[in-house]
Amino acid sequence: MDKNALLIITTAPDDATSEQIANALIEQGLAACVNILPGMRSIYKWRGKLESGHEQLLLIKAQQSAYAAIEKQIEALHPYELPEIIAVSIDAGLPAYLDWIAGRMPTESQ
């Protein structure tokens, strides 16, 4: 089992931004998968003011070695001044799935 997998979490304001980020990460080989979950509402304080907005949550599965490039790509494509980018280590999971995140596809006999 590969223990170098990350779950990277970010938010986006709309479909276009979510899809642009997801497509770029997949096309560049930086992430194995990006899930886009629509319909999220965020409430937060920004510069001392209470804010609220509808967003989409992106769950990005990738290798730790790709994190810096993923962070850079999200910052480049994101319209927010300070985008949420949080990485969580994946300590356990289905071994074959973690191998897939690592770019190792299981053979047909597995």
Image (cartoon, rainbow, N blue to C red):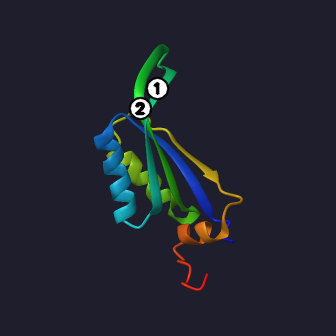
- Taking depth in this image into account, of 50 and 101 the one nearest to the observer is 101
| Image x and y of residue 65, in percent | 55, 66
Furthest toward the top, the residue is 49
- CB under 8 Å between discs 2 and 1: yes
Is 107 on the left-hand or right-hand side of 4?
A: left
Residue kind at label 2, given as amino acid type: Glu
Q: Residue at x 46, y 59 (%)?
A: 33
Q: Report the residue marked by disc 2.
A: 55
| Image x and y of residue 34, in percent | 45, 54
Q: Is mark 1 on a helix, strand or loop?
A: strand
- Residue 86, relative to residue 31: is it above or below? above
Question: Which disc is residue 41 wearing?
Answer: 1
Furthest toward the left, the residue is 16
Crowd around label 2: few <14 · some 14–19 · many ≥20 (10 Å): some
Mark 2 vs mark 1, CA separation in Å: 6 Å
Quadrant (top left/top right/bottom left/bottom right) for the N terminus? bottom right
Residue kind at label 1, given as amino acid type: Arg
- Residue 86, relative to residue 26: is it above or below? above
Label count reads 2
- Residue 11, relative to residue 96: is it above or below? above
Of mark 2 and mark 1, the one earlier in the sequence is 1
Question: Which disc is residue 82 wearing?
Answer: none
- Taking depth in this image into account, of 35 and 46 the one nearest to the observer is 35
Crowd around label 1: few <14 · some 14–19 · many ≥20 (10 Å): few
| Image x and y of residue 47, in percent | 47, 19
Quadrant (top left/top right/bottom left/bottom right) for the C terminus? bottom right
Q: What element carries label 2?
A: strand
